[in-house]
Amino acid sequence: MKKEIVKLLKKALNEKGIKLKDEEIGKFIETPPSPDMGDFSFPCFFLSEKLKQNPNQIALEIREKIGNPPVMDFEDIQTSGPYINFVLNRKSLAKKVVWEVLNQKQDFGKVNLGHKKKIVVEFSSPNMGKPFGIGNLRSTIIGNSIANICEFEGFNVIKMNYLGDWGTQFGKLILGYKKFGNEKKLHENPVKHLLELYVKISNNKRYENESRKWFKKLEDGDKEAVILWRAFKELSLNELKKIYKLLGITFDEYDAESKHNKGMDKVIAELKEKKLLKKSEGAQIVQLKNYNLGTCLVQKSDGATLYATRDLATAIARYKKYKFVRMIYEVGKEQKLHFKQLFKVLNLMGYGWADNCVHVAHGLYLDKDGKKFATRKGKTIFMADIIDQTTSLIKKEIKDRTPKISKEELEDRALKIAMAAIFYGDLKNNRSNDAVFDIKRFISFDGDTGPYILYSYARASSILKKVTTKKKFEVFELEPKEIELVKKLSQFPEIVLKSYQNLNPSVIANYSYQLAKIFNEFYHACPVIGSKQIEFRLALVESFRQVLRNSLKLLGIKTLEQM
Ligand code: ARG
């Protein structure tokens, strides 16, 4: 509907000699504080300077230029001081929205912006040989949602995981295993055993030199080092895949730092040739002081390469392979400088596509007391344990509600609700802010939570299961809550677009909650069964169910028919 209003305004403004783009006009359109003042309004203050007229007068003149709008779309258009207020023809809006949702189904809200062009979305990217912790979770959840959103907007998305399987930590693990390793323990619980070894070696300065040497050996292809590294990697990857399975997340490609070893020599040679490399205390650097970005260390004095070197080689290889129009790195905000340096060096190397790379950063997870989560009491918190704890808490709640539930159904439901709780608990926050990880609050069936939203979905499903109708719907009269619900549904396409433009899933997450809330209010205010317009109300419930489902799918949350 907003589109229609933009069209009318554009024409009228044009006649007054003001040329604005659709998006610009769209930005000025507001929702009035109360529905009696209309459904949309256009304030005229900003035109006052240009037209050298007072805004009330401008409003009147624009209103006049709009003329008689189509009655199918508008009941009325009036001015109120400097505002032009648009009152929609709500019955036709209701029909139009419901009709569109029920026809387009899972495609409702899609805009084909992408024309199948490629976007690489890199996310999750945990360091192997370390437990997958809560810090890795944000990137996984947010990155997955961003990938879904880009796909929905018509791009061909490559979901990429960039495993941290190279670097000095492997020197520590190899040394640790040689000194204190236990094969049986390693196979029983690789992640816990490797962590044990890592801690033992890191806590003792005496091992620093020797672990560095082991990493260098690994880089030089030493047989013993490579065999151990491969075993650690394989075992950790198996554990990781179990977690992704529980989270319901898949990748199109597992990239890894180690895969770009060969490319690194080339990058260093290329940097040299392009005269970007400088020697500094025996190491090789790219000087970025002129750009206020410090120095980017590319090769250590012993010849070992670094994280940045691998990222350079990786980015170049990916562009060669995919010719992406955009590459998104979903990584914590503590790596801001790293990515700025990476993109700058690529740019200095003459790669124009570096401008299409973005670091989509997220804040930390904090615990309830506002402290950084991962280091709490120096203990590591394992993802698998978090999922376990969450599901068992939810199982209790489900058993209280449905004592007779079968075991499989209980497992399935509990896992889905647990995931909705964790995913939504994260995604409702603007990603650049720190977020509080509070499982007790996340799993509540009331309030701004994942389970509450799933519950509304299940409620809609149960209504639709109880009553069916083959009759076409007719709209006689609309209650305020029906209008609110219709309007909210109609916003979905804009919401997805905004969330894509800002690469921020919280826009969709917050929308899902508001939608669920309005639906629950509608449900209490407008009985479906026995209503004069039962057919319309059923269609409205079905539309709600569809839009909520589309919305949750973009967040990576699966729905449930019963709760
Ligand atoms: N493995 C890294 C870490 O856990 C994150 C990798 C991010 N991606 C990248 N291309 N550098 O800190």
Image (tube, rainbow, N blue to C red):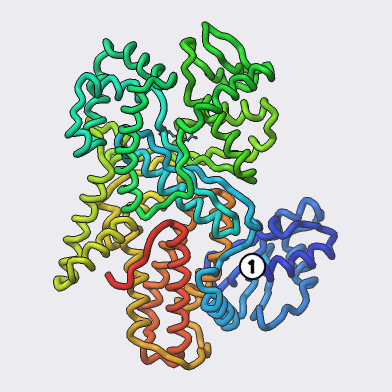
Q: Quadrant of the N terminus?
A: bottom right
Q: Secondary structure at mark 1?
A: helix
Residue occupying image coordinates x 75% and y 70%: 63
The residue carrying mark 1 is 2
Q: Is residue 267 above or below residue 364?
A: above
Instruction: Give percent across and percent down for residue 488.
Output: 50, 69
> Viewer-proximal residue, 126 or 220?
220
Quadrant observed for ligand 1 in the rendered image: top left
Q: Is residue 248 visible?
A: yes
> What kind of residue is marked 1?
Lys
Q: Is residue 415 above or below residue 455?
A: above
Q: Residues within 10 Å of mark 1 (few under 14, many from 20)?
A: some
Place residue 497 in its image quadrant: bottom right
Q: Is residue 138 above or below residue 26?
A: above
Instruction: Give percent across and percent down for residue 363.
Output: 42, 39
Instruction: Give percent across and percent down for residue 246.
Output: 31, 53
Place residue 24 in its image quadrant: bottom right
> Viewer-proximal residue, 27 or 84?
27
Residue occupying image coordinates x 42% and y 52%: 250
Q: Quadrant of the C terminus?
A: bottom left
* Total numbered circles: 1
Q: Is residue 371 visible?
A: no
Residue with the most extreme top position: 281
Q: Disc 1, ligand 1: is the CB inside 8 Å?
A: no
Left/right placement of residue 83 relative to residue 375 reads right
> Viewer-proximal residue, 179 or 453?
179
Left/right placement of residue 219 relative to residue 47 reads left
Residue occupying image coordinates x 52% and y 56%: 149
